[in-house]
């Protein structure tokens, strides 16, 4: 199994009175679709799996190794989280794409590949003239979502944690997004955990469900 988590327990709500306990797994080439009503803790689960938020108990494993054995920065480069609201920083589109390679997570380990970035942007319908030089803060919601997705792919993770990634996309850009994700999943040793309400995940091929109740 490429990625699995056992009896992850975490609390929800202002007073932390409701506790959630979940287990799940996903093999290479597969997508684990996390479903549940609003407030059930789907986004919280992704943040915990990315080790951006603590949990009460439980354990996650990547390729058989416990997250307790892997430093946080290394884990987040392999199990990479893409938030529902795209996170962009001051600077150009190119600056934002290169940013992870200047961080502690990847500095000295991987090098930013501009040509590879251009390929992803073209596939995601973001190859218009001057786009790389554009101020990232001026992008539309759909453009920002696709840019952040391309940046995540450039990091080179084994597992993508995707929180409603296609929510701001229209028909053509949504189709392009799922086409790129499907192609990425076809490579060996890759999987995704996806929070989605749109049902488009059915075009990704192999998927299973994890239901979280409120």
Image: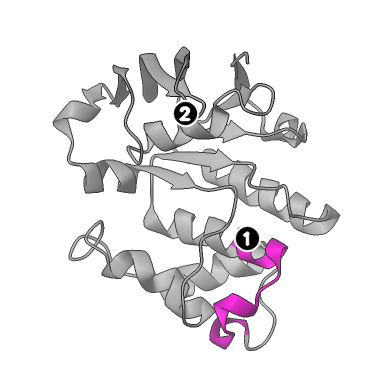
Task: Classify the position of the C terminus by image quarter.
Answer: top right
**Dot 2: within a 10 Å radius of its alpha carbon, few (fewer than 14), some, or many (20 or more) residues?**
many
Task: Classify the position of the N terminus by image quarter.
Answer: top left
Q: Is residue 109 visible?
A: yes
- Residue 100 is labelled as none
Q: Residue at the location (43% across, 37% down)?
A: 47
Q: Is residue 191 visible?
A: no
- Residue 45 is labelled as 2
Q: Tell me if residue 119 comes above or below residue 191 in the rendering.
A: below
Decide whether residue 205 is among the magenta residues.
no
Q: Residue at the location (64% across, 69% down)?
A: 122
Left or right, residue 56 beside residue 201:
left
Query: In front: 76, or 137?
Result: 137
* Residue 137, horizontal then vertical, whole percent: 58, 77
Q: Which residue is mark 1?
A: 146
* Residue 120, horizontal then vertical, whole percent: 57, 64
Q: Tell me if residue 146 comes above or below residue 83 in the rendering.
A: below
Task: Pick out the residue farthest to the front.
Answer: 15
Which portion, as a residue range, is magenta? 131-146
């Amino acid at each position: 199994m490429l990625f699995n988590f056992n009896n992850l327990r975490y609390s929800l709500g202002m007073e932390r009175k409701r506790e959630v306990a979940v287990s799940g797994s996903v093999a290479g080439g597969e997508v684990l679709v996390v479903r549940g009503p609003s407030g059930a803790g789907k986004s919280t689960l992704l943040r915990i799996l990315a080790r951006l938020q603590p949990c009460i108990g439980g354990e996650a494993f990547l390729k058989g190794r416990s997250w307790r054995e892997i430093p946080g920065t290394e884990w987040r480069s392999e199990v990479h989280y893409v938030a529902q609201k795209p996170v962009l920083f001051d600077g150009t589109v190119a600056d934002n794409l290169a940013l992870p390679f200047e961080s502690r997570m990847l500095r000295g380990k991987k090098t930013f590949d501009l040509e590879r970035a251009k390929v992803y942007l073209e596939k995601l319908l973001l190859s218009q003239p001057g786009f790389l030089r554009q101020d990232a803060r001026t992008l539309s919601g759909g453009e920002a979502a696709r840019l952040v997705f391309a940046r995540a792919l450039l990091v080179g993770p084994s597992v993508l944690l995707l929180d409603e990634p296609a929510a701001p996309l229209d028909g053509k850009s949504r189709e392009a997004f799922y086409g790129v994700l499907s192609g990425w999943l076809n490579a060996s040793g890759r999987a995704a955990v996806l929070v989605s309400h749109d049902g488009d995940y059915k075009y990704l091929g192999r998927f299973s469900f994890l239901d979280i109740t409120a």
